[in-house]
Image (cartoon, rainbow, N blue to C red):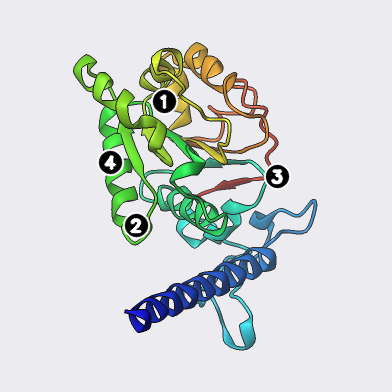
Amino acid sequence: MRKSKSKSKQMRKGRHEEEQEEISKLNRWIDSQKPDSGTNPLSLPPLPKDAPIGILQDDKFSRYSGATMFKELPLSKRTLDGDILGAAKTGSGKTLAFIIPILEKLYKERWGPEDGVGSIIISPTRELAGQLFDVLKTVGKLHNFSAGLLIGGRKEVEMEKEHVNALNILVCTPGRLLQHMDETPNFDCSQLQVLVLDEADRILDVGFKKTLNAIVAQLPKRRQTLLFSATQTKVHSGSCKTEFEGPGVYQRA
């Protein structure tokens, strides 16, 4: 019995050390991709089609400066503290450009059930929110984060109220999120790390600006905000009270 406990303890210690090494490696990757102050990645030559991705030899990392599509960008750069305003057409890889960094950020922060809501992803429609949630489940299936899809329907809201405070990642429509903020006892987003507005131009076009302002007013100011839009011209940092401080705009060519 003692041998079994000792072996289990060693296995837990081994997993912990592996996680620490992965997190350390991830942080080095992020640091290697930090842009110089005042630089514009779009002014650099585009990446070759066969450009390497990730870790190279000698613990060096591949270059992403000069990327012209979201799927070419250094996804880990989304985990920097700065806000991001992105404009990209459908199919350019923008969903993964925020899903993966959210998982990376919570993972390296060792986010757990007791930490509450770490990220909120807002989508304009139930259908789009459902698609985002499917991608999140696929990409994040090896993580232990809890996630929930919060969309329409009066019957479902009562069931959601029982579980929403135990979720780490919320994928939702604006109205449903505000409903929980107003009605669900002890609903707490004070530890929020990342707020994402997907299809932000559509959200504002369909008249959710007032709802968004009410939501943002209840979120912590110290957070990262990512706004993604089909067009750069329709969405800007003053579109809603997001206190947006983005270092740059990444747009598909």
Q: Is residue 40 visible?
A: yes
User: What residue would you read off at disc 3?
Assistant: 247
Asked which secondary structure carries label 3, the reply is: loop
Q: Name which residue type carries label 2.
A: Val
Residue, x 38% and y 76% (percent of image)? 5
Q: Which residue is mark 2?
A: 139
**Where in the figure is residue 119, as x and y percent of width and height?**
49, 40
Provide residue 9's location: percent of width, then percent of height: 44, 75
For marks 2 and 3, the one nearer the N-term is 2
Q: Secondary structure at mark 4?
A: helix
Mark number for residue 131?
4
Q: Residues within 10 Å of mark 2 (few under 14, many from 20)?
A: some
The residue that mark 1 highlights is 202
- Cβ–Cβ below 8 Å for labels 3 and 1? no
Q: Amino acid at mark 1?
A: Arg
Packing grade of label 1 (10 A; few <14, some 14-19, many >=20) is some
Q: CA distance from mark 3 to mark 1?
A: 23 Å
Kindly check if marks 3 and 4 are in contact, taking CB atoms under 8 A apart as contact: no
SS category of the residue bearing label 1: helix
The mark closer to the camera, 3 or 4, is: 4
Q: Quadrant of the N terminus?
A: bottom left
Residue in front for this viewpoint, 68 or 20: 20
Q: Secondary structure at mark 2?
A: helix
Q: CA distance from mark 4 to mark 2?
A: 12 Å
Q: Nearer the viewer, mark 1 or mark 2?
A: 2
Identify the residue at image location x=68%, y=68%.
Answer: 32
Q: Earlier in the sequence, mark 4 or mark 2?
A: 4
**What type is the residue that disc 3 sits on?**
Pro
